[in-house]
Amino acid sequence: MENNNIQRYPVTQPQQRIWYTELLYPNRNTSTIIAIVKIKGRIDVNVLKQAINKVIEQNDSLRIRVTTENGVPYQYVRDHEDQDIECLELNEAQAEQWMLENRPMAIELLNSELHRFVILRISDEETWLHFKMHHMISDGISMNLTVNQISRNYLKLVNGEHVPNEGSSYLDFIQAEHEYEQSERYHKDRSYWLEKFSTMPEATGLKQYNPLTMDTEARVQSFTLSDELYQGVKAFCEQHQISIFNFFLSALYIYMHKVTGENDIAIGTLYANRTTKKEKEMIGMFVSTVATRMQVEPNQELISFLKNTAKEQAAILRHQRYPYNKVIQDLREIHRNHDIQRLFGVSIQYRPLSFFRMGEAVVRGVRITAGTPSTISIFISWTIWMTGSCSWTCITAPSSLMSTRREKCFASSFVLRSK
C-alpha cells in the first residue's frame, strides 16, 4: 500500500471466511463471482459506461482494497476515479469463447482492484455485460443489486435525470458488526448454536471424506425446471403457505434420509445476513453460512414436516449472524475435539432474482456463476435460481468423486422426489 496514512478497517466475519479460503487454496479462482447480463435492444454504450462508473462511485465496497500487516488482513477504500470500461465488438460465438477463456483468470487479492467490467457488443440490438468480482467485496445478492443499480443509473442518465454520487457504505456494516460482537444478542446467538450442536448429527453428507485433503476441482450440472414442475411447486407452496426455499430444503432433508438411512440430518445453507433495510440495498460481502439440522421421522406427514422445517428456519433467521467459523471453534473446545472440520457436507442455497428494464432495452438473460467450480469443505452444493417466470438449478460436485452420470442421477432422482 503506497500511503500509510490511509484509514484501514478490519475485515468482517463473512470476509474472513473468504480470506481463510484464499490462504488454503491460493490462485485457484474459487473466490470469484461472475455475472453475464444479456440485454436485448439498443443500448448507448457510452452511457452504459457512465452508469457502471456511477455504481462504483456510489458503493465504497467496490473501491475496497485488501492489505496485510503481520499476516492479519485489513481493508481500505480508494477514492473514486472513473475507469475506462473495455468494450469488445464480437459476434455471439466469439463472445461465448471469450467468456470461456476469461473465466479461469483469477483476481489478485492484495492491493488490487477487486472487480472487472467488460461490455461485449454483439450487434446494434444486443449487448452483453460481463463483470467479475472477488468474493471479498460481493456475494450473490450483491451481483443482482449491481445489475439493478447499473440499470437505474442508465435510465436516469438517458433521461437526463440527476444521479447521486453517494450511496450505501460497507463501512456501516463493519461498524454494525463490531457493535453486534459486543452485544447481549451475540451471546444469545452463541448459546443457541452451542445448544443446537451439543451433540453431533448422525448424517452430515452423502459420503465420508476429509475436506482438507479432498481435491477441490468440481463439475457443475445445470438444468432448468420444466414449466409444469415450476408452476406446480409455486402452487403447492402458495396452497400450504410455505416458502419455495423451505419446500426444496425439506425435499433435500428427505432425500438425504432415504439415501443415508439416518434421521438426524444436517445441511448447510447460506443466508443473506442483511438485517436492516439499508443493508438489503447494500453491495458487499454479507452472506452467512449456517448449518441447519432436522429430525426426519419416516411416519410423519409431509405437510407437518414442511411446517416444522419452516418453524426451524424462522428460529435460525433470528440467530444467523453468529459466525459459522466461531461455531466450529466453540464446538472444538466444548467437545475437546480439534478434528471437527465441518457440520455439513451437502449445502443448498436459494436465490430469487429480479431485474429492472433499461428503457426500451430488456435484460433477457442473466447468469451468475463461480469463477472456477469447486467444493471447498462441501461434497455437494445445490443452488436454485428463480425469477418470476422460470427456475433453474446447479449441482456442484467433486470431479474425483462424481461422474457426470452420477450428477445427472442425483439431479433427476432429487427432482422426482421433489414432485
Image: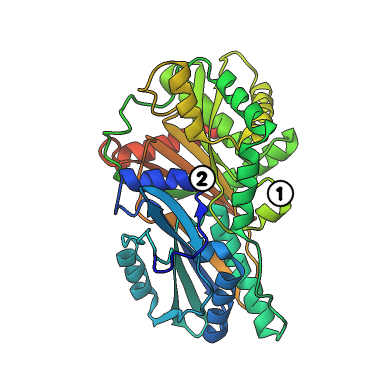
Q: Are marks 2 and 1 in contact (CB under 8 Å)?
A: no
Residue 107 place in picture, x, y as percent: 36, 61
Q: Name the residue tied to disc 1.
A: 276
| Label number found at residue 77 | none
Q: At numbered mark 2, what does the secondary structure look like: helix, strand or loop?
A: helix
Q: Quadrant of residue 375?
A: top left
Please say which color scheme the image uses: rainbow
Q: Which is nearer the N-term, disc 2 or disc 1?
A: 2
Residue 373 place in picture, x, y as percent: 36, 49
Rendered view: 348 above or below 50: above
Q: Nearer the viewer, residue 131 or 169?
A: 169
At label 1, which amino acid type do we have? Answer: Thr
Q: Name the residue tied to disc 2.
A: 14
Q: Nearer the viewer, residue 232 or 32?
A: 32
Rendered view: 323 above or below 362: above
Q: Nearer the viewer, residue 167 or 126?
A: 167
Tell me, yes or no, if residue 248 can be seen here: yes
At label 2, which amino acid type do we have? Answer: Pro
Q: At numbered mark 1, what does the secondary structure look like: helix, strand or loop?
A: loop
